[in-house]
Amino acid sequence: MINIIDCTLREGMQARQCHFTTEQSCTLARKIASLNVDIIECGHPFISDDEEERVRAVVECTSTPVLAHARARKEDVEAVLRTGAQWIGLFASINKVSMATKFKGKTRQDLLAMFDSTIRYARSMGLKVRATIEDAGRTAVSDIVSMVSTAHAAGADRICFADSVGILLPDETFEVLSLLSHEFPDVVFEYHVHNDRGLALANTLAAIKAGVTWHSTSCNGIGERSGITDTFQLITLLTTRFEESRFNIENILALSELVETYSRIPLSPMHPIVGDNAFVHVARLHQLAMQEDENAYSIFPPELISGQVELTRYTPIHQQNLFLQPFEKSATELKYHRHGPGKRFVMLDKRLVDGSPYYFIARQFTEFEVDESAELGHVDTHIHNCDSVFLFLGDGEDYSGLEVEVDLSGKLRNLSSPASVFIPAGVPHSYRFLRGRGTYINFVNKGDYHDSLLEMPM
């Protein structure tokens, strides 16, 4: 059986766009657990009090076992113990690059002894231990063997071969992992690979072929630099090609959207399985074939992941009129909105430009003060899966003359124009007109407003 340790909540935090809050981490942990993965990896508790608290919260909010990251040091082990995590991931390396940059002044024997003693200490404290050979792809086989021998003798429950820079080709991955599996038949191996060369999934399949049963992945493949093996790609492949039925792949599209929103790492429409174009067919011959049989150009039925086939394409941009005619439209066309004061004009959306990536409206306030009956405003709190912006411009000198109330994630702020509010993806928000005259502009980074709404999972 192939086992999955999902590393979204650790690897994601090593991407520069991403910083999961504790609340977001718990929401994601529950949804990741619903895929039926085996372990959730979450963070490095020693690095800060906030990170320790985040890991602790994830441990408490899910029944799926949690693994926390740690250097091969006693103080790191103690930080993991404070979180209540069941597993610890201890990592070390003895290749030339690591010894020259991270372990100056230490010999191989020093590092092996440190690895040994920390594993033994963690085990003595009741933790299950995954011992990771960091940057194994650039480590001599003899040194890998030394580290595996040391970790195994110290009682590690599982040993991870981490190709930390994605340097190996699939045949090289198969060769070294086959050798290790043969030399250490009693060791349970895990494989972790980065996607620097776009080979993460191919290398993971090579590792599976070599007999490795544990694999670390992340949702949407997020992680440091180019990320790691994509959870969704691997479990969908296992389900549809290798008849593995235990993963709940019907949940992945909603989870992919949530990860993209919280991580602030945008997906390419060409991203396999979960990208916007994954099941879109626009070549005329392909469309005709798909109308006869949806298997004609689909590798698997998209209904398995709650997706659907689409056969429409956008009108070529050079064939469209780009001098637009905005139109007045009540906000009642939008979910979470009522009519509201003043006039609302749609300046840009997919109705004005086919395939528009942006939604842009302007509302003109002509009343000096809101009617008492509209005290609660006309916009209920809602969340977008993309960034958006509020702009408030009064009719007075220097755009003064407009007062509004904005709610951003439960924090109320009264603003006087000119004012602007940046609303990150995933943040609950609303606004309310108070008094004055002027213009409100709303920009949403998606061409269809309803496609931008994030319906929060329970």
Image (cartoon, rainbow, N blue to C red):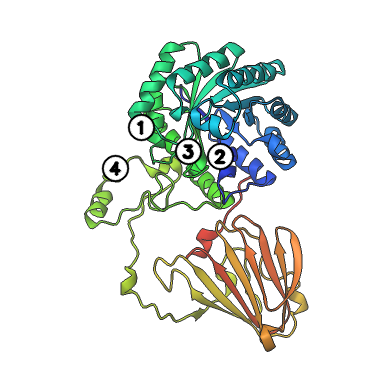
Badge nearest the viewer, 2 or 4: 2
Q: Does the rendering let one see residue 245?
A: no
Q: Earlier in the sequence, mark 2 or mark 4?
A: 2
Badge nearest the viewer, 2 or 1: 1
Task: Check disc 4 and report the residue beneath it.
Answer: 295
Image x and y of residue 384, in percent? 58, 59
- Looking at the rendered structure, the number of numbered marks drawn on it comes to 4
Task: Check disc 2 and report the residue beneath it.
Answer: 11
Label 2 environment density (alpha carbons within 10 Å; few <14, some 14–19, many ≥20): many
Q: What residue sits 49% from the left and 34% below the top?
A: 164
Q: What element carries label 4?
A: loop
Label 3 environment density (alpha carbons within 10 Å; few <14, some 14–19, many ≥20): many
Q: Which amino acid does label 2 sit on?
A: Glu
Badge nearest the viewer, 1 or 4: 1
In the rendered structure, the answer to whether residue 410 lies left or right of residue 141 reads: right
Task: Check disc 3 and report the residue beneath it.
Answer: 228
Image x and y of residue 354, in percent? 39, 68
Q: Does the rendering let one see residue 444?
A: yes
CA gap, disc 2 and disc 3: 8 Å
Q: Which of marks 3 and 1 is nearer the N terminus?
A: 1
Task: Check disc 1 and report the residue beneath it.
Answer: 169
Residue 329 lies in quadrant: bottom right
* CB-based contact (under 8 Å), mark 2 and mark 3: yes
Badge nearest the viewer, 3 or 4: 3
In the rendered structure, the answer to whether residue 418 lies left or right of residue 355 reads: right
Q: Which amino acid does label 3 sit on?
A: Ile
